Amino acid sequence: MADKRLVLRDPALFKDPANLTWERYVALQARERERYHVERATLPAEALTFRSVSPHYLERAVEQFANNYFPEEAATR
């Protein structure tokens, strides 16, 4: 079965709510990335390497991550 294509009948009715052009989108992403790097630089190294948490917590956190991102594998265990 062929995929149905979504067609916008009247493009004049569509307006991007953020009024983003490609250039504005790239600039927005660059600003967000810079903000992320500044915020990440303030975190202690122990937090980034998970040295301050218990091994049991880390094991459960990894398991939860795997369940969220690979649900078909989690369902077959």
Image: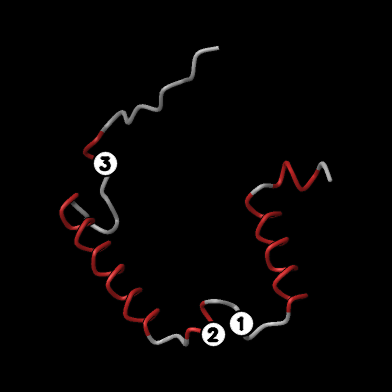
**16, 33: nearer the viewer:** 33
Q: Is residue 38 above or below residue 1?
A: below
Of residues 57 and 49, the one drawn nearer to the viewer in this rendering: 49
Is the residue under label 3 in contact with that under label 2 (CB below 8 Å)? Answer: no
Q: Quadrant of residue 38?
A: bottom left
Q: Quadrant of residue 32?
A: bottom left
Q: How many marks?
A: 3
Look at 50% across and 13% down and name the residue there.
2
- Tag 2–tag 1 contact (CB < 8 Å): yes
Mark 1 burial class by Cα count in 10 Å: few <14, some 14-19, many 20+: few
In the picture provided, is 14 more to the left or to the right than 57? left
Q: Which residue is mark 1?
A: 51
Q: SS for tag 1?
A: loop
Residue 34 higher or lower than 65, as above or below = below
What is the number of the mark on residue 46?
2
Badge 2 marks a residue whose secondary structure is helix
Residue type at mark 1 is Arg
**Residue, x 71% and y 47% (percent of image)?**
71
Quadrant for the N terminus in the image: top right
In the rendered image, which residue does mark 3 sit on?
13
Q: At numbered mark 3, what does the secondary structure look like: helix, strand or loop?
A: helix
The structure residue drawn at horizontal position 18% and vertical position 58%, both measured from the top left corner, is 24
Which amino acid lies under the numbered mark 2 shown in the image of this protein?
Glu
